[in-house]
């Protein structure tokens, strides 16, 4: 499953090829992963434990139950005792023994019905989703019809017809009626897969349709298939017990449902044989719970987004705690970020995604933040905007963020809500994900206005039209839904929303990277014009240096969670100091001058969990020296710029802006 | 002149759009004619919505043309009937996709598509040698150490590495043509060059032709011999890359050139915000499709669709205003 694109930018690149630790450690097996995941999930452990218990009961009832469940050898209606754990029935049978012997049938029904329903559901759902057209029409119709059939009455009718055929009729009827819910889910999942490139790739490669369905689609849906099996199993256990309770099926079979039937017939509750009446229900509930727990657990394991990992801050960065006297922020700066660190939890321990980053932003200033995927640039701005959580995980582990003189890090959520959007706003990477698809642009603007101001309906309408005009969108689009707008228009609409309250700072996270070159360029020109006209400050995050070339005042180059270089844009472009910056600049083929062979930046950013011991850029650096591999460079100040590279150590002494570099 | 590797004639693809009973037609590709030589890298340049991905899928036989024909080595592609013929074509023409995050099945190791390519198209490789072949092809696209990369799952690789896997699975079937649909647009700028270099290298080493689809003219200049510019389903300009970039004839090509991401470029005059986008061409009338965005449009552009005409040596442009050399 692919992650949302924003989240990609902080995920560690996985095991680094070539430069990593021994590969054996990173090689994984699917089986091992599942085992580990189950062992770490409480719901899964409880579910597996319960289910194993029932499996044991079903396999060796003779060893566990003291008596033959049908032996009517005791005094009828005994209460619970050491000898009869749950008492005896009105016929003098041991209740506990009956429960144990009844497990087998319930479990068998669950497994058989679950299996049957899943097979039908998979075949119908996946064929409908993949083949589409008329096939889909017919199959979906059948699915929907089955879904709305009132199952219980129908089963009663069918089971009554087949009164004495018992077990297998029950399994087949339940199976034939229980697949539709799973089929619908599998169909919609298949539909969403249909446009995925790997299926198209398989077709272009020349694979047959049957191969694509069985070997390409099914393996990606394991979690749904398991869920559909477990769901059907729960349904089967409950329905079977219910049917047997009302006397359908074979009343002489050994099952929890028939126990309920006989208990009811003998008015067990009134006659003091409480456990006879209650315990079968409890067992049904426990078996149902076992399947349901497994279902939940499987959901959590297969979609990590549902799992809440707790960040263990101990040992993340002890150095942070050394108290630095806090300077008051400078009046002329709208934003001052000091030694900001952010970490998030991963399966392999805490990952420091932003490592002691400091910078200042003047009022009306335009700062570009550039770097490759996973360098921490998105995490940095999300932390500044106090938006960490979903989709970008992370916690601020140290530092301060002064926005208009107040420390955002310590601000309570209530106060944050007050200034967010009014004083600063955020434009996300993908407008398609950030805009709500079922609301019109007008609705979304109204929601924002109502949440953050006391404007009247007319004022809101007025203001919405105004901001749309600002970004050159005809106000007729105010009542359009996001999907009716083109990609460029959606991005501009997002910027319009950010402008609703004329904020003093707008944070933009790659707002143009989903657009074509022409759209990118025109959007940048527009952002710059607006900024000059309205005077807000901008933090602009991108991986594309060319975008900020003419528009930003200053440039912050990030590499592997740290500041690599920070300086005036003009100066950085004219004379880049860090080899990484040079590499970023030289990664562009040009349409000017003679054609040159370019190399880009070979290799890839380091895994933040396995940082190189020296300079983080050393493995990819064309100027690497022995020292770079063992010693960490500090930030050096050269001609008013900051750069983290030993090449510039001699130029001036290290800056005392941060507590780092001591290591 | 010898037979080109691939020739498209009057290639047209329409899609029905709108509600169930509407007969509106989206003209994704209209009457496109071009050739592709052996060992040639041709860039197909245009914005999203210009029809370039549709052309890629027509060539890869994902779509069938509404009209027109594609000839591969002189034989019409629509005449492929048997599974054997279609497999042979699939082995001659491979494709690399835009999104490296969705083009490899996440349920398998990264070698899955490569291995399937070997199973389907390389009958000469015995079962016991397959893994060797797969690992070799990983190495040939620069994924080293190949044996270790082969054991990984897609999520363990970066975008650039995944895109290399895409090239490896295209290459392993020994194709004569690789259709690369925006192979770098979703990658970080810093690693794009590596993938572009890989294309030139594969052309040199394996003699394979490329149809390189992109919206970035500068990357087209970097790898391609010839460039085709597409706007709203029409081919609007064609010629040797260097020539087209130095002296663009069509006003749309000029717009594309002004938008090229180049950190060293001066801020041009033409950067005045052009907020236009390629129109969705639904049941079009006569007339130039670029006219609404065109700074040079004249009355004739409203009434008459410009045809491609020669505007210099090896140069074609579809514009009433463009001057020939």
Image (tube, rainbow, N blue to C red):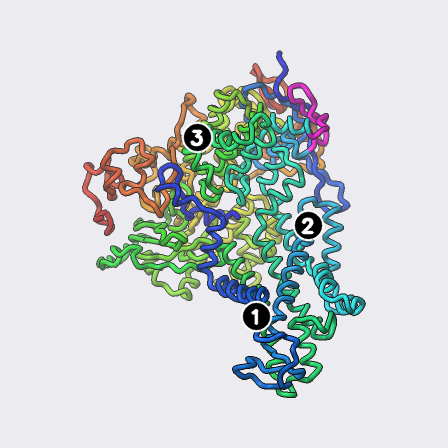
Q: Chain of mark 2?
A: A
Count of number-bearing discs: 3
Measured Cα–Cα span from mark 1 to mark 3: 55 Å
Q: Are marks 1 and 3 in contact (CB under 8 Å)?
A: no
- Answer few, some or many: residues within 10 Å of disc 1's Cα (few below 14, many 20 plus, some between 14 and 19): some
Dot 2 surroundings within 10 Å: few (below 14), some, or many (20 or more)?
some
- Identify the image quadrant of the C terminus of chain B: top right
Mark 3 chain? B
Checking the image for residue A32, the label placed there is none
Placement of the N terminus of chain B among the 4 image quadrants: top right
Q: Is residue A600 above or below residue A400?
A: above
Q: Secondary structure at mark 1?
A: helix
SS for tag 2? helix
Q: CA distance from mark 3 to mark 2?
A: 41 Å
Kindly identify which chain the residue marked by label 1 belongs to.
A
Instruction: Let me know if residue A100 appears in the view.
Output: yes
Residue A123's label in the rendered image is 2
Q: What is the magenta range?
A: B64-83
Report the residue marked by disc 3: B142
A206 relative to B75, above or below: below
Q: Does residue A465 sit above or below A268 in this rendering? A: above
Label 3: how many residues lie within 10 Å, few (<14), some (14-19) or many (20+)?
Answer: some
The answer for how far apart the CA atoms under marks 2 and 1 are is: 30 Å
> Element under label 3?
loop
Q: Which residue is mark 1?
A: A286
């Amino acid at each position: 499953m692919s992650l949302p694109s924003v989240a990609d930018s902080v995920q560690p690149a996985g095991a680094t090829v070539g430069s990593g630790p021994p590969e054996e450690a990173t090689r994984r097996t699917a089986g091992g992963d599942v085992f580990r995941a189950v062992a770490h999930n409480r719901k899964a452990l409880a579910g597996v434990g319960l289910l194993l218990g029932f499996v044991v009961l079903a396999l060796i009832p003779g060893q566990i139950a003291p008596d033959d469940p049908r032996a009517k050898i005791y005094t009828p209606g005994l209460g619970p005792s050491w000898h009869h754990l749950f008492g005896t029935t009105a016929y003098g049978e041991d209740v506990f023994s009956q429960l144990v012997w009844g497990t087998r049938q319930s479990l068998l029904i669950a497994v058989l019905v679950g299996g049957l329903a899943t097979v039908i559901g998979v075949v119908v759902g996946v064929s409908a989703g993949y083949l589409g057209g008329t096939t889909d029409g017919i199959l979906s119709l059948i699915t929907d019809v089955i879904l709305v059939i009132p199952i219980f009455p129908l089963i009663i009718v069918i089971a009554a017809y087949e009164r004495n055929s018992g077990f297998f009729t029950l399994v087949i009827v339940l199976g034939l009626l229980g697949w539709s819910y799973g089929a619908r889910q599998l169909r919609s999942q298949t539909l969403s897969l249909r446009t995925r490139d790997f299926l198209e790739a398989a077709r272009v490669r020349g694979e047959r349709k049957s191969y694509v369905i069985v070997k390409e689609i099914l393996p990606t849906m394991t979690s749904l298939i398991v869920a559909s099996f477990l769901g059907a199993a729960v349904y089967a256990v409950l329905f079977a017990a219910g049917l047997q309770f009302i006397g359908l099926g074979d009343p002489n079979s050994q099952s929890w449902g028939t126990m309920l039937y006989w208990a009811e017939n003998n008015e067990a509750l009134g006659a003091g044989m409480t456990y006879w009446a209650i315990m079968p229900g409890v067992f049904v509930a426990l078996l149902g719970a076992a399947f349901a727990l497994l279902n939940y657990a499987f959901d959590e394991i297969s979609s990590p987004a549902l799992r809440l990992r707790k960040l263990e801050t101990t040992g993340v960065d002890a150095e942070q705690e050394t108290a630095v006297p806090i300077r008051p922020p400078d009046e002329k700066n709208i934003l001052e970020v000091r030694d900001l660190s952010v970490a998030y939890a991963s399966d392999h321990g805490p990952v420091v995604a932003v490592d002691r980053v400091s910078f200042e932003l003047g009022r009306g200033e335009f700062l570009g933040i550039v770097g490759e995927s996973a360098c921490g640039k998105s995490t940095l701005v999300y932390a500044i905007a106090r938006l960490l959580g979903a989709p970008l995980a992370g916690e601020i582990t140290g530092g301060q963020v002064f926005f208009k003189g107040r420390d955002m890090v310590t601000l309570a959520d209530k106060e944050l809500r007050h200034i967010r959007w009014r004083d600063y706003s955020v434009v996300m990477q993908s407008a398609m994900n950030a805009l709500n698809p079922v609301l019109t642009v007008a609705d979304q603007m109204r929601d924002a206005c109502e949440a953050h101001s006391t404007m009247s309906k007319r004022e809101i309408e007025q203001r919405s039209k105004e901001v749309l005009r600002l970004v050159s969108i005809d106000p007729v689009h105010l009542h359009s839904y996001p999907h009716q707008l083109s990609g460029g228009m959606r991005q501009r609409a997002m910027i319009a929303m950010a402008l609703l309250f004329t904020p003093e700072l707008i944070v933009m996270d790659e707002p143009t990277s989903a657009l074509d070159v022409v759209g990118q360029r025109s959007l940048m020109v527009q952002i710059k014009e607006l900024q000059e006209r309205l005077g807000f400050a901008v933090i602009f995050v991108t991986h594309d240096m060319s975008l900020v070339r003419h528009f930003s005042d200053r440039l912050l180059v990030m590499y592997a969670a740290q500041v690599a270089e920070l300086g005036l844009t003009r100066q950085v472009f004219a004379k880049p100091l860090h080899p990484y910056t040079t590499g970023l600049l030289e990664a562009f083929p040009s349409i000017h001058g003679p054609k040159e062979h370019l190399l880009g930046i070979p290799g890839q950013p380091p895994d933040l969990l396995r940082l190189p011991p020296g300079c983080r850029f050393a493995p990819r650096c064309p100027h690497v020296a022995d020292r770079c591999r063992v010693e960490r460079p500090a930030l050096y100040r050269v001609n008013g710029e900051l750069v983290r590279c030993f090449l510039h150590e001699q130029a001036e002494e290290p800056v005392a802006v941060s507590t780092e570099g001591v290591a | 002149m010898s037979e080109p590797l691939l020739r498209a004639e009057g290639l047209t693809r329409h899609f029905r759009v709108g509600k169930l009973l509407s007969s509106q037609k989206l003209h994704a590709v209209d009457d496109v004619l071009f050739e592709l030589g052996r060992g040639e890298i041709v860039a197909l340049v245009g914005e999203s919505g210009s029809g370039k991905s549709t052309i890629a899928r027509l060539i890869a036989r994902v779509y069938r043309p509404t009209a027109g024909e594609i000839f591969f080595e002189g034989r019409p592609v629509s005449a492929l009937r048997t599974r054997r013929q279609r497999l042979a074509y699939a082995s001659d023409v491979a494709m690399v996709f835009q999104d490296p995050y969705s083009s490899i099945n996440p349920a398998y190791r990264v070698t899955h598509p490569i291995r399937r390519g070997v199973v389907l198209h390389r009958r000469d490789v015995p079962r016991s040698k397959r893994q060797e072949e797969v690992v070799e092809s990983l190495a040939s696209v620069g994924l080293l150490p190949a044996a270790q990369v082969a054991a990984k799952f897609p999520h363990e690789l970066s975008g650039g590495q995944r895109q290399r896997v895409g090239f490896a699975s295209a290459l392993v079937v020994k194709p004569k043509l690789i259709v690369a649909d925006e192979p770098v647009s979703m990658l970080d700028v810093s690693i794009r060059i590596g993938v572009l270099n890989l294309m030139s290298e594969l052309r040199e080493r394996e003699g394979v032709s490329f149809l390189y689809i992109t919206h970035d003219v500068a990357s087209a200049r970097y790898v391609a011999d010839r460039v085709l510019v597409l706007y709203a389903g029409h081919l609007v300009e064609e010629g040797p890359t260097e020539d087209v970039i130095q002296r663009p004839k069509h006003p749309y090509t000029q717009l594309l050139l002004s938008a090229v991401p180049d950190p060293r470029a001066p801020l041009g005059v033409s950067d005045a915000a052009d907020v236009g986008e390629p129109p969705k061409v639904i049941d079009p009338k006569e007339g130039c499709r670029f006219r609404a965005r065109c700074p040079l449009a004249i009355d004739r552009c409203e009434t008459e669709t410009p045809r491609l005409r020669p505007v210099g040596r090896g140069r074609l442009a579809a514009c009433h205003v463009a001057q020939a050399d």
